[in-house]
Amino acid sequence: MKRFSVVVVMLLVLLTVIFCGSVAFAQAPEIIIFVGEEWLESDVPSVIQEGRTLVPMRAILEALGASVGWEAGEQKVTASKEGLKLEMWVGNRQALVNGVETTMDVPPRLISGRTMIPLRFVSENLGEEVTWEPDLYAVGINAAPAEILPQLPFRETSIAGVRLGMSRTEVKDILGSPASESRQYSDFLEGYQRVITYPYGEFTFYESEGRAYLYQAEISDSDRAGGSRNIRIGDSVEEVLRKFPDESNPPVKEQFIDGYYRILYGEYDHLQQYGVVRYDGNMNPVGVNFSTEDYLGFVVNIQDGRVTSMKLLIQMN
């Protein structure tokens, strides 16, 4: 029960970093942002609207080393850095750059009470270089995501645009009305769980203290629903593997089943940080598994060399 208690605590921690609003292209994966070589952490995920990335105002401006001003009455954002000054207003495409009026492709917006500002416009007008890597669904500011991200172990907590730890209401606000919804008792969890189903997958919630928290999400259809690092149904196993570290370890025979595994990185042990490829007895890849020491897991199932389903979860065992 000690491990189970840790999992419940993790669910509560994850709940503090959720996003409560509707977004465009909700089934797309969450955007990863690097400022320099640092992964930008935020309690609110970035979103894409009108083809542009909107990011939480304070998180990005402080990461860029800019001073931040907010005037609630005017809903005005001010950012200053090294002689450059930006002035923007929520809902207004017109902005001032050092006093000169210019037009933004998408205006700043309030989403669930948080001010979201256009990433590229702000960064470039503060003198930074922005790189968009669509294959990874990642943005680099003075950084190359295609070089940085594949060197980092799995650590993501989102899939199909939602985060582990979200409530049912928050997930449905993003993904829309489900095709079905059920509630059932789990002997393993020693409590009730709820499952909401969409045409492309299932999202399972653990009930605790009157609330239900997302602890598992499985995508089994639709190439629009992205997993960690923009992995999609139908991707080849080679496409999956090149998005994660690979130490070129040799295959090892499984002890109790007719199969093999190859460690990509880390230690292939319960609740360790690792990445591993699984093979059948004929050395055909059947899956790629990732784990972290803080109970996160990401499972990618492979058939005929292609992704057939993927599951992101808080490991309960």
Image: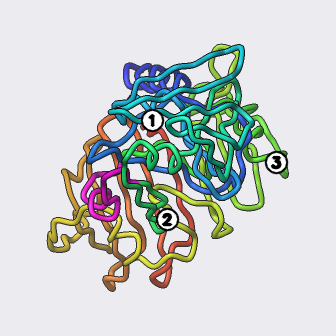
Q: Hey, what amino acid is under mark 1?
A: Ile
Which class describes the residues within 10 Å of circle 2: few (<14), some (14-19), or many (20+)?
A: many
Which circle marks residue 303 in the picture?
none
Pointer 1 residue: 60
Q: Mark 3: which secondary structure?
A: loop
Please report the residue visible at 75 percent of the width from the left and 44 percent of the height from the top.
196
Q: Earlier in the sequence, mark 2 or mark 1?
A: 1
Q: Which of marks 2 and 1 is in front?
A: 1
- Is 114 one of the magenta-colored residues? no
Q: Which amino acid does label 2 sit on?
A: Ile
Say which label, 2 or 3, has the lower sequence index. 3
Left or right, 167 with respect to 79, comes to: right
Helix, strand or loop for disc 1: helix
Which residue matches tag 3? 178
Q: Position of residue 7 (x, y in %)?
A: 45, 27
- Label 2 sits on a secondary structure element that is loop
Q: Identify whether 15 is placed above or below 271.
A: above
The disc at residue 231 is 2
